[in-house]
Every structure is written in structure tokens, then in C-alpha cells.
Amino acid sequence: MPASAGSAPEQDRPAELTVAPIAHAHGVVRLPGSKSISNRALLLAALAEGTTALSRLLDADDTRVMIEALRALGVAIERDGDAARVRGCGGRFPARSAELFLGNAGTATRSLTAALAFADGSYRIDGVARMRERPIGDLVAALNALGARIEYEGAAGYPPLRIAPAQRLLRDEVAVRGDVSSQFVTGLLMAAPLVAPEGGVRVRVAGELISQPYVAMTVAMMKRFGVEVRRSGDTFVVPRARYASPGALAVEGDASSASYFLALGLLAGGPVRVEGVGGNSVQGDVAFADLLQAMGARVDRGADWIEARRGDGLRAVDWDCTSIPDAAMTAAVVAMFAPGRTTLRGIGSWRVKETDRIAAMATELRKLGAAVEEGADQICVEGPTRLREATIETYEDHRIAMCFALAAAGGVPVHIRDPRCVSKTFPRFFAELTALVQPGAA
């Protein structure tokens, strides 16, 4: 690894960072807090009655925009490193109007849109240019069907949004598509207890529900805050209830971020252990360890840790990644090292993430010498005999920067454009990577 990949402050990092050839890697990484859990915890704590002490909270761009948005809505939040105290507003935001800029944070944008739809105020929600290209129409349609008054400022189906004081709740059942983003379902579920009639609200998922573990995470966290959701087939039944603070909540380590280091253990010998996530996790991306094991890793697990190392050779796989779309990006890079053709299915949601990830991954994998076929819902990767040195465009996408850094385990330098983009979820990623690796000659 180069000196430039060390622990320099984010503002001092270069526009391009070279990951030197990696000969071996081993060690332990304490993961940052889960982005998905952190932002759900922040919103639920803000809506709850009482004060919640959050620990191991992710300190990155996506949580910062959520915190700033909640503060703009009148919620008192004290932040100290990875700890925060959130004084809940009892289901009613103090600010009756606000303009919220949410960057490219999909979780924050979708969940706050739902939470504000019936907040009896006037709000504007916007983000960066890419956020204006990420669909939200199915969620808005569902909320408006319930009686919300949400309008598009620009292109229909996309932010920016204007939210006006809502009408009364028009019905107690609503349908929302589940095959574009599970965040639409998550947003509806978290907002529903605050507006539900006595018999509750029924949220029906139309079609396939992708990324189901993320919805299961939402339901589990709502239970921590005192609201129990029942599921019957394709329908979630949400009771009328008030959120109550659990007092304290520790955020799990980020399972998506764990994927890079577990893959490094396979590709560069290992063992590499991640701490903060394990067998007791509520995150679906822990299942990446099963995929990695199928590809040839030796994997060990504990309640709060997972460890991976090289096994008896890498293998190509044909794998359904519907439940692990973020971690599947890491598997696409690992696939370059496995003899044969790897097919990763169920990744259609990549098209509407921070960038069109299917197109971006295909382009960058080819630079390294891989043969790639892309489809609407899958990607097929066959690695070269030897990887080529390459400069990787990151498309302002943190996960592309992190997963392609692993390609240096193929004995070639890998140049990562805009390494600062990892600040979205893992500001210290390159420093943690440096601490694990032993460089090798190209």
C-alpha cells in the first residue's frame, strides 16, 4: 500500500490513490457502525418519547446528513464521536417547516419523506444530482394514496419534493412495489404507527420484495422502540402506537463493510477478522460469508465476529444475491480470481443506487482484464490469466472504491480515483486496509 493510503485527514487525501500490490493480509478490523442501523436508530430515537443514548454510531456522510436534517426539524441531538444522545419529540417534529438537503443518502431521503408526509408541516427534500435520479415515485404514490400531499418540483418520480400539510388519513391499507427499493417499504413501516387508526395500517407489498433482510431489520428495530409489526404473507400490519425510547442502543458494525475485509482474507491469505458483526447480527449482509465460503474461503464465526482466510482454492459460483446486493459488489471483484465464470443474480437494484452499479462494475472489471456480461438483473464475470494494472473510476460511489481496492491482491497496482468518496460510509477504509496488508512486487 502507498504512503498516501494512510491515516491522513479526508481533506488531505489525493484525488487519486494507488493501492500497491498486496502480497499478504492478516489482522483484525473493528468495523464502523452500520449505516442502515444508524440512520434507522436516529430517526426512531427522534420520533420516540424519551431520550436515547446511541453508541457505536456510524460517523460518516450519510449519518451526518440525517443528524443535520433531524436538527433542522427541531430534534435535540448531542454528538460525541460515535456516541449520540437524541431527545425524542414524541412523534411530532417541533419544526413545522424546513428545507432538508440529504446528499445522496437514500435511506435518509426515503424514510424522512414518509415520516414528514403526515407531520402537519411544509417541507422540502432535495439532494445531490444523483439523488435526483434515484426513484422515489412508488413511495410518494403510496403516501399520497393514504392522504399525503407530496409534489415533485422537477421530474415526476424523483426528488426534489415538496410536502404540504396532509389531509386526514384516507384509508387503512396501501400497496407499494417492493422490486425497486426495500427502502420504500421501510419508510412506510416506520411512519405508519404515528398515523394509524385504531385497527392499524396494512402495508401490502406488490410483487417481489427485494433486499428482504433490510425490511426485517426495520421491523426488529421498531420492536426495540416499542412497536411490534406483524407480517402475513405479502402484508405488514402496523398498529397505532407511540415509539418509546429503549434508553440505550448499541449499533452493530457494518456488515456490508465487513465484506471487503473478509474477501481480503480469502484473496491475500488471511486470516482477517472483522469485529462488531457476527452470528447474532440482524443484518442480511452477514450472508456474504456463505457466498465467500462457496467461493473457497475458510470462514469461522462468533457472536460478534467473522474471520476468513484462504481455503483450498477459489471457485466460480452461480449465486442469487437478492438478499445481499451491496456485498455482492465485493463478490464481483473476487470472481476475477476464480477460474471459470461466476454469475451473480438478483442485483437489479444496482441500477438505481449511487450510480448504475451494473454498468459501472462491468466497465471497471474489464479494465482489469475480466470478461464481463451484464444483464438487467445479473452480472457474469470471468477473470483473466493475470490482472492488468488499471485506474478505477469510482462514479462518486463509495462501494466501488472499496471493492476495487481488493484487486491489488492480484499482484498489480490499482489506482482509485476520488478516494474521498468512501467518506459516505467508511472514512477510514484505506487506513484500515493499510494496517492489514504486506505489500508485494508488481
Image (spheres, rainbow, N blue to C red):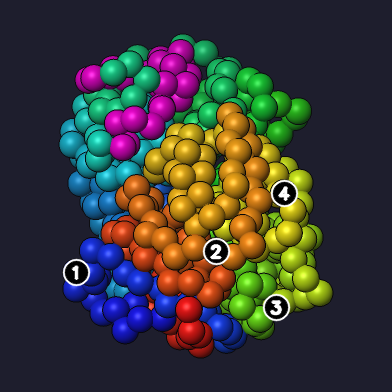
Give the magenta range. Answer: 130-154
Which is nearer the eye, 238 or 365?
Answer: 365
Locate residue 306 relative to residue 414 in the image: left or right.
Answer: right
Mark 4 or mark 3: whose residue is earlier in sequence: 3
Mark 2 or mark 3: whose residue is earlier in sequence: 3
Give the residue pinned by disc 1.
Answer: 11
Compute the Cα span from label 1 to label 2. 31 Å
Compute the Cα span from label 4 to label 1. 40 Å
Farthest-out residue, front: 385
Give the residue pinned by disc 4.
Answer: 341
Residue type of the residue flagged with mark 4: Arg
Q: How crowded is mark 2: few (under 14 residues within 10 Å), some or many (20 or more)?
A: many
Which is nearer the eye, 228 or 329?
Answer: 329
SS at mark 1? Answer: helix
Residue 354: name its quadrant.
top left
SS at mark 4? Answer: loop
> Is residue 139 within the magenta segment?
yes
Compute the Cα span from label 2 to label 3. 21 Å
Residue type of the residue flagged with mark 1: Gln
SS at mark 3? Answer: strand
**Residue 387 circle label:** 2
Give the residue pinned by disc 3.
Answer: 309
Locate residue 61 relative to residue 216 in the image: left or right.
Answer: left
Where residue 187 sits: x, y (%)? 47, 35
Residue at point 47%, 38% (across, down): 359
Q: Residues within 10 Å of mark 4 (few under 14, many from 20)?
A: some
Answer whether labels 4 and 3 touch (C-beta < 8 Å): no
Answer whether labels 4 and 1 touch (C-beta < 8 Å): no
